[in-house]
Amino acid sequence: MFRFDERCRRPSRILWFAASICLVALPATVSAQAQGGLYIAGDGFSFQVAAEQGMAKNPRGRRFFLLSLPPETAALARTAARPLAAVRERVVAANGVLFVCQRDVDNGRLDLSLLVPEVIAVRGWPPPGSTQIPKGQRYFPDENPAVLPKANDSLRRLRTTCS
């Protein structure tokens, strides 16, 4: 027959085991929630409106992504008007990542050298049949995955917009 103290220890071992499993699974859950969505300036929204939405929906430093399409890229220029530059600086301080489309750089609509250094040019989808993105991969070989969205829907939307 079990003594009283042995019966009390058994459930506590089960609870400790369950708690340790939860702690192991927690980082995956937290990292999935650690990134916010993609906000697009120039898609019917001004830079300021898209930036304000991104900051409002991603409080306490949760990383989010702000893609600017011309002419809303003016806020990203080194010579941006002070009010726009202030919004841009708030986005960066709030852990926002600033994107422009590489296609706009390639076609001469944007000059990266005139933009603030925090801006990252992102490529759209490669042409059909291309092997630029290796099969089963999400990124071009020379891209830094750490600066791009981890969520498939945000990355897909980003690439589609920049195609």
Image (spheres, rainbow, N blue to C red):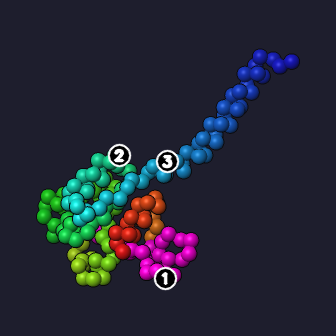
Which circle's residue, 3 or 2, is located before the other in the chain? 3
Question: Which residue position holds label 3?
Answer: 30
Viewer-closest of 24 and 163: 163
In percent of the image, x 64 and y 40: which residue is there?
A: 20
Assess whether residue 135 is covered by the magenta stretch. Answer: yes
Question: Which residue position holds label 1?
Answer: 130
- Residue 51 vs 133, above or below: the answer is above
Q: Label 1, label 2: how many angstroms apart (C-alpha)? A: 40 Å
Question: Which residue position holds label 2?
Answer: 60
Assess whether residue 151 is covered by the magenta stretch. Answer: no
Q: Which SS class for mark 1?
A: loop
The amino acid type of the residue labelled 1 equals Ser
Query: Does residue 40 appear to the left or right of 133 in the view shown?
Result: left
For the C terminus, which image quadrant?
Answer: bottom left
The amino acid type of the residue labelled 2 equals Arg
Query: Does residue 40 appear to the left or right of 132 in the view shown?
Result: left
In percent of the image, x 49 and y 82: which residue is there?
A: 130
How dense is the environment of label 3, judged by Cα within 10 Å: few (below 14), some, or many (20 and up)? few
Viewer-closest of 3 and 154: 154
Q: Which SS class for mark 2?
A: loop
Please provide the residue range marked out in magenta: 116-143
